[in-house]
Amino acid sequence: MVPIRSLSHMIKSIFFYHPESPAAPFRLLERAGEDPAGSRPQRFYPSAPLLAQDQFTNISKDLSTNLDRIKNIFSARDNSDFVIRTFEIDADTDRIPAFIIFFDGMADSGQINEAIIRPLLKNHYCKGDSPDTIQRLIGSMLVEQCTLKDVIYLEEVVDAVSFGNCALFAHGCEYAFLADVKNWGRRSVGTPQNEAVLRGPQEAFVESIRTNTALVRKAVKDPALIIEHISIGKRSKTPCALLYIKDIAGDALVCEARRRLLGLDIDYLFDSGELEQLIEEKTYSLFPQMVATERPDKVCMALASGRVAVMVNGTPFVLILPSVILDYVKVTEDAFVRAPYSLLFRFVRMIAIAISLLLPGIYIAVAYYHQHMLPADLLFAIEASRENMPFPSVFELLMMEAAFELIREAGIRMPSAVGPTLGIVGGLILGQAAVAAGIVSPIMIIIVAMTGICTFAVSNYSLEFALRISRFGYIVLGSAFGLMGIAGGIFLQLVSLCASYSFGVPLLSPVAPKMRFTVNDIIPRAIWKRERLPDYVNAKKAKTQAKISRKWTRRRN
């Protein structure tokens, strides 16, 4: 049972605004050093990493010492896929003992044999050159074969080998050589599965972080694009990337994103969904505070507007921050079609959001308390269809909504070839059988079906979840208090949204608070009228194009 104190604290954190204190959450201010109340300066955000470096262990010149350490760290006796190959390097006057380590299946064993071990066993490159050091000898033999990096700390070797590289140790050498020979299975770039569009790029992110960064660089082609590498997880050391355009994104936003990423004290990180929960401000809020997308073009548009993106290796979904509530209504296709078309699409999506959220609750409220609002013919038809129904309307609605959620969840978890068939056949059979058996009225089937169709029109997966959960609350409020309960629920939800922030940006921006520029936020504008970036991100560069971008329309003298 949840304690009363914890429950009250959770309710206050969701619905009430908390004034700033010395330990207040981050707020993105208009200018650096400015405080909304004018009482104190904005706190400083360092650009350097905040976490202290661990005490690294130096690599020994004694080969047997290094070998014992490696066997102990990687549990060589227990790990069947950990490979240690010992051999001797063919030097000019002597043969130098050495060994190489890698994980079978993550590293390319063929490349290791041909590009590393074979040249070292049969040295045809440095005979007679008399190299000064062992490092120079090994580097001269392998530099043409593969990418090498020499390191002096054993922890760097552990991280690289765990990520699919191989490490070379030689006797008398205080360096270890890391070779990039990664060859784990990876998915090729395909089409988006969850954010399909009719017009626009058809590429989607994959699980490889380097492939994803390459997709962004290919589209942006801006030398000011910065991709910072950040490892998260003391054990997993999951590679992550912080992306922003240096001369557009605000310093406060970039430093706050970096501070939250570096301030995570966890052992493992596997997905961007976990990272989203770790760095968001309100963990109990129904509405998402970051946009998760699998489309590179959407990330590029966000970066060009002064925002920040976070990538996590092993997942095709990239986080965009900060976000506002209108970002979950937009799709990238709005920018690729003409303004009248995008206006129609966005208007339809907004209507679908309203219907999916409020239609069941409003129906219950009208049926229970406000029958006088319905035309007489419609009211008689509804009452005639419900004449022999054994259950109250609210119970019917909750039962059908629960059945619809079960069918949808089962369709997702079933194999792809069976899932759509299960959804269609299950919905038709259940609906028809329930009406024929006299358990559910036909009007209830129409309400539930219309609500489900409008839910599928929502463009964002996280927003769809928020609407599905909130819908049950409105059903309860409508059955208990009528339209007054629906209005009260809308008011409480708006209060919660007004008190929500995403990396210092109010979630209802630019509507509340009202911003100076609302470019392409509510009503899509033509591409030649988007002169300014959104004001709520406080980008360094306010203008994105000339006031008259179509110069060919100017009159000739």
Image (cartoon, rainbow, N blue to C red):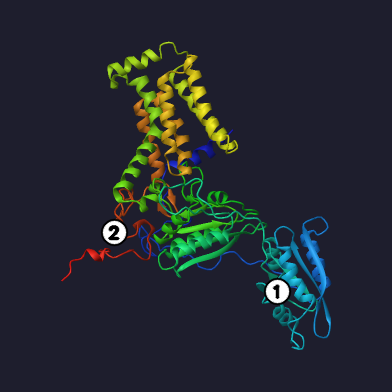
The answer to whether residue 1 is above or below residue 502 is above
**260 or 121: which is nearer to us?**
121
Residue toward you, 7 or 141:
141
For marks 1 and 2, the one nearer the N-term is 1
Amino acid type at mark 2? Trp
Give the image location of residue 28, x and y in percent.
Answer: 41, 58
Residue 169 as seen in the image, left or right of residue 23? right
- Looking at the figure, which quarter contains the C terminus? bottom left
Residue bearing mark 2? 528
Check disc 1 and give the amino acid type.
Ile
Residue in front for this viewpoint, 529 or 273: 529
The N terminus: image quadrant = top right
Q: Which residue is mark 1?
A: 152
Question: What kind of element bears circle 1?
Answer: loop
Q: Residue furthest left?
A: 557
Question: Visible in this render: residue 503?
Answer: no
Relative image position of residue 131 (x, y in whole percent): 74, 86
Q: Tell me which corner region of the image, top left, top right, bottom left or bottom right, holds residue 307.
A: bottom left
Whole-number angstrom distance, CA of label 1 to CA of label 2: 55 Å
Q: Residue at x 70, y 79 (%)?
A: 139
Instruction: Pinpoint residue 123: horizontal percent, then vertical percent.
Output: 77, 80
